[in-house]
Amino acid sequence: MPAAAGFYYAETDLTRTPRVPVLLLHGAGSDHLCWPAEIRRMADERTLALDLPGHGRSTGSGEQTVQAYTAHVMRFLDTLGVYRAVWAGHSLGGAIALWAALHHPERVAAVGLVASSAAFKIPVKLLDYLGDKSAFPEALEILQAHLFSRNPEKTLVEKVMRAFEKAPLSRLQGDLKAAADFDVRGEISTLSLPIWAAFGTEDKLTPPAAGSYLVRQIPQASVLLARGAGHMLMLEQPKIVGDSLAAFLKLLSLNLTGS
């Protein structure tokens, strides 16, 4: 996996497309492996799946605000010589994409949101438990209860939760604080960029109501409602989510170099 200025990332460009790249941003406490092959290896797209600072194999430390993470991501793109990209993110990664679109629209060709919206409702008890190292097992229980649908694959749950168990407590705490403090509901209706969003009908952190709110604020948004999926819908239903995102990107017809 290549690295640039301390950022590790996975890049796929099977056809050497001239279109702007698709930047994939993971959620809280995660890394680029949260994106399945159906999304990382979309046909006719150049994808850049990034490990945020202090996550995965990237150096540096995690942040506690969406604004700070956005600045890091722009520095990463600058290092690669990429000026403009489609910013697509899961959960906290979607918040980063929205912040960039609102405050640096010249760097954003379009926005993709997976289980993400203008604000989050992070359980207060989860944040409290993360502030107490001895209560980390209880925090993981709450997290697991909010991440998946009612009937997820056992192996998927075990794999995802194993990664969270190994994550530094401070990193997860900082990421969830960034998500809890994020709120752009007063600005979201000003967005004029193309937007695609996917929500799971059984998502407890970003419920379907968040999708309804997004459509009310941005009527032109393209929305996928994945039935029976939870907050990790891109892992629970990778083909459905991947096909929907790929179709959205093809409609954009972004025949740009991205540099």
Image (tube, grey):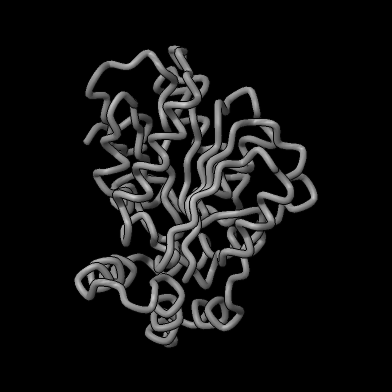
Q: Which residue is drawn at 25% across and 32% down?
A: 2
Residue 76 sits above or below residue 34 on the image: above
In the rendered view, tell whether residue 86 sits above or below residue 140.
Answer: above
Horizontal side of 77 relative to 208 (left or right) equals left
Query: Quarter-wise, where is residue 257 in the image?
Result: top left
Image position, residue 239 (x, y; %) = 29, 49
In this view, the residue in front, 115 or 170, is 115
Residue at 47% x, 46% y is 89
Where residue 68 sits in the image (x, y, percent)? Answer: 59, 45
Q: Which residue lies furthest to the right in this view?
A: 186
Indicate whether 220 appears above or below 53. above
- In percent of width and height, residue 148 lies at 39, 71
For the point 29% across and 66% down, which residue is it?
160
Q: Is residue 169 left or right of residue 151?
A: right
Camera-side residue of 227 and 86: 227
**Where is residue 226, by image quadrant?**
bottom left
Total marks in image: 0
Q: Please state if 258 lies on the left or on the right of 182 as rendered.
A: left
Which quadrant holds the N terminus?
A: top left
